[in-house]
Amino acid sequence: MDKKLSDKLVIASVVIAVLVVIASFLGLFYPGVYAQETANWRMQAQGQDIGNLLAVIVLLASAYGLHRQSFKAYLVWIGVLFYLLYAYIVYAVAVHFGSLFLVYAAVLGVVFYSLLYAFISNTIPKETGIYAKARARTAASYVLIGTGVLFALLWLSEIIPALIAGNPPASLVEAGLIVNPIHAIDLSVVLPGMIITGILAKRGNFNGLFFVVPWLVFTALMGASIVAAMFIILASTTTNVIVPTLMVTVVVLLSIVALYYFMAKIRLIKKA
């Protein structure tokens, strides 16, 4: 990776980290941020805030790796930005207008253009490929495909009966939303992206192998934020979310194991 490019991405990462820390701490400790939200949506947002703080740690660690020209750190960095892009789309469109709106917009903008700049700057020479051992490819592929299918079925099991009945899903009513942006983003972009990446990676396709690490990082961070939200709900209400908490925890652990194993087995190679 070009040194000037990596240094620019490091600077962008620091800016993102500062903005995310400000938004997350205010969301967790300043009651006015989510004052207009339902109790359920507020707890979900605060779980996301905790996940965001974890993402900042991973972001800064990967930015340090970028500074040292690490290709694996670059892949992790992309995954963290995928997660933050997703999270701040939700904040920007599904949290009532308030004091942090411009911060949400700023994070969203810097994350989006940092990713765009990285992708169009030819960070990997065209003659370079990615090699990963078959077992590492297979394990990572099955985790991504399984996660994508699992959450697609979970969301559809809620959406389809609601459509048939002509009523909004119960979770939508509880959150106080007119539409759930998580359902929209997951079903249209995220879950198909995971499944397609898993299929391509299993076949040894370059693009599939390239996006395995970003999607696994995304899945681990997103799962961690969901688990954090569920613990907040468990501590604050009588709602029984133990089963989904355990399910998402398993997804997080499998993602971390697959990520570790895959990263240990990948390397850049010169194409013949």
Image: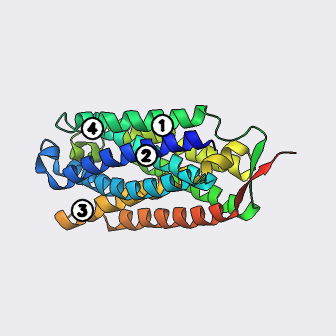
* Residue behind mark 1: 114
Q: Residues within 10 Å of mark 2 (few under 14, many from 20)?
A: many
Q: Is 38 left, or right, of 141 in this rendering?
A: left
**Picture residue at 62% right of the left edge, 41% below the top:** 2
Front of the two marks 2 and 4? 2
Mark 2 residue type: Ser
Mark 1 and 2 residues: CB-CB less than 8 Å, in contact? yes
- The vertical placement of 238 against 211, above or below, is below
**Sequence-wise, which precedes: disc 1 or disc 2?**
2
Residue at mark 2 to residue at mark 4: CA–CA distance: 15 Å
**Sequence-wise, which precedes: disc 2 or disc 4?**
2
Q: Is 226 left, or right, of 33 in this rendering?
A: right
Residue at mark 1 to residue at mark 2: CA–CA distance: 8 Å
* Residue behind mark 2: 13
Choose top left, top right, bottom left or bottom right for residue 134: bottom right
The location of residue 67, given as percent across then percent down, is: 54, 51
- The vertical placement of 156 against 51, above or below, is above
Mark 1 residue type: Ser
Mark 3 residue type: Ile
Per the image, label 1 sits on a secondary structure element best described as helix
Q: Residues within 10 Å of mark 3 (few under 14, many from 20)?
A: some
